[in-house]
Amino acid sequence: MSQLLHNPQYRKLALLAFVLVLGIGSAFISVQAQVLPYQDPALPIEARIEDLLARMTLEEKAGQMIQAERAASTAGEVKKYYLGSLLSGGGSAPHPNTPAGWCDMIDYFQKGAMATRLQIPLIYGIDAVHGHNNAKGAIMFPHNIGLGATGDFDLIRRIGAVTAKEVRATGIPWTFAPCIAVVHNPTWGRTYESPGEETDLVTKVSVAFTQGFQGEAIADLSRNDKIAACLKHYIGDGATDYGVNAGDANFTEEWMREVLLPPYIEGIKAGAQTVMISFNTINGLECHANGHIINDILKEELKFDGFVVTDWDGINDNGGSYRDCVKSAVNAGIDMIMVPNRWLECLKNIIDLTKKGEIAPERIDDAVRRILRVKFRLGLFERPYADRSLNDSFGSAEHRTVAREAVRKSLVLLKNDKKILPLPKTGKKIFVAGKNANDIGNQCGGWTIAWQGQSGNITPGVSILEGIKNTVAPGTVVNYDVGGKGAKGHDVAIVVIGETPYAESKGDDQLLDLDVEDRYALNNVKKSGVPTIVIIVSGRPLIVTDEIKNWRAVVAAWLPGTEGQGVADVIFGDYDFSGKLPITWPSTIKSPKEKPLFPFGFGLGYGVTK
Ligand code: BGC
């Protein structure tokens, strides 16, 4: 034989035979793999789930219940511990922060999952709460409070669809959105993540976002441009005492059902696939340990068939040892634990608690069934890797147009004395001032590129000042000074004031007054005697009761995102104002709802002055 191999003819034949054997062998293996029922897309999803579940060990099941942070895990660990999910926390992005960078990262982790015995794909989750906000160059939409002001639910559906496309373009199939808090106190630092203070409004936003992200039917979820939604934070996040983030909320079940639950009920009916538990307690009990709200209401009563995820390390305050926390969370009905760094400890505890009978195997099966259901519905078993064909739509002009429309519709005109607005595009000398006039980071707010957000040119966009300059006729003078110096001699001043970026907890503010920088700019302009239009860029109402008499016009612009051009579109009269207050504008911080400066639903237009 060895001699035969010296003969080139025989060598060729032997090689051919070898290749044939390999080919038949691998074809055989792939046919074998195809025939496993759970891998057969032609079978009903429920049959696939049961088939797969029956093949899984306890370790494989427990792994599915873990969601680790990308920066705290490797593809090797995903494979070794059968991790079911990874996330990007606020600001957690790959290098480079480009669509290709994201796709490469997702595929790297996914390869780990696909190298496991059963090849169960990962589900990667991220906060895309006003567009794909961790991704540089993505379109940042107005935060939810501004979308509540639009009252345009078709627009919100379209925003959901654009966001889904941009998120999928980076290989991600799941967003932790929408936040459907019904906000009760604007001192809460997450007020801007809520669509407003009224249940009906929030409910409509919940449905619109769910449909936009996911499509109208469950079958749409497997499209390459759809993502799973996550209704959050269940429940009571916006109703804590004194508006303290993650604080204690005190209410009766009757009130909860009437005021806070409808956005969940309707969001679930619209098909929302996941629900995130809230950090707050209800009458002293941690939501993450509250079997009544999760097992009884969400799963039994509302028939929610997707999965329940915790908030970031949300189980840690459940009480007792860490083991106790894991136990109370899983037994309360939590399916997936967002446990960014401590995931191995959590995983080992789930396994041990189950082995010792402290968590019933049926509870584990329920959790895994739900997680697999969402993965099957998303088509992840068929297409686990990033679809790079969507890259061109990321940050596209078409998407930008939708955001600009959203900005226009979110603006609320609070005052317009002697109809100073709309401004003419010609014949006026315009002065612009204020720290939020020319700052993309400030107009985007928190949850933009960084977790707490950041001032400055953090991502491409059009500032409010640039929008004004783009809109006026050639020859019209627009001068700008951040501190408001040099206003004298102008016909009109536009002062853009408000808040600088913040997110959860750091944003809690018991005063809501204007800061020193804003007062300085306003004072300088006031001294000039030039008629003043104030644009407030903020995540919530600010207390301006004493100052407003000095201003001819006032616009609440919320946190508009990257498309600041939308502001000029309206103040120069190309479009009318249509936004209405989604939240009461208080006159003092002590009594937010009594004798408000402007009531819920208030908003002027060019045809209406009162
Ligand atoms: C927030 C959630 C968010 C999660 C992941 C938490 O701190 O409360 O809203 O989805 O982090 O970033």
Image (cartoon, rainbow, N blue to C red):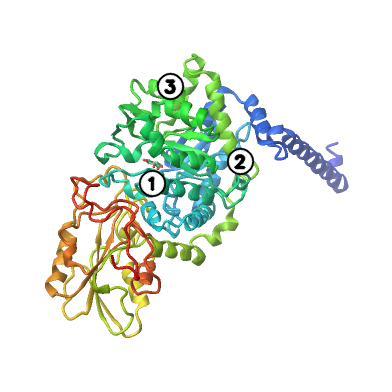
Q: Earlier in the sequence, mark 3 or mark 2?
A: 3
Image check: 208 left or right of 318? Answer: right
Viewport quadrant of the C terminus: bottom left
Give amino acid for label 1: Gly
Front residue (pair 585, 386): 585
Of the pair 150 and 491, the residue shown nearer to us:
150
Q: Residues within 10 Å of mark 2 (few under 14, many from 20)?
A: some
Relative to residue 188, is residue 96 drawn left or right? right
**Ligand number 1: quarter of image:** top left
Tell me: is circle 1 under 8 Å from ligand 1. Answer: yes
Residue type (three-letter) at the residue carrying disc 2: Arg
Single out the residue that lies furthest toward the top: 356
Count neighbours of disc 3 (C-alpha within 10 A) and say few if under 14, some if 14 to 19, many if 20 or more: many
In percent of width and height, residue 393 lies at 54, 61
Mark drawn on residue 377 = 2
Hey, what amino acid is under mark 3? Lys
Which residue: 36% across, 43% down? 182
Tell which tag, 3 or 2, sits nearer the viewer. 2
Residue 90's disc is 1
| Nearer the observer, 47 or 268 | 268
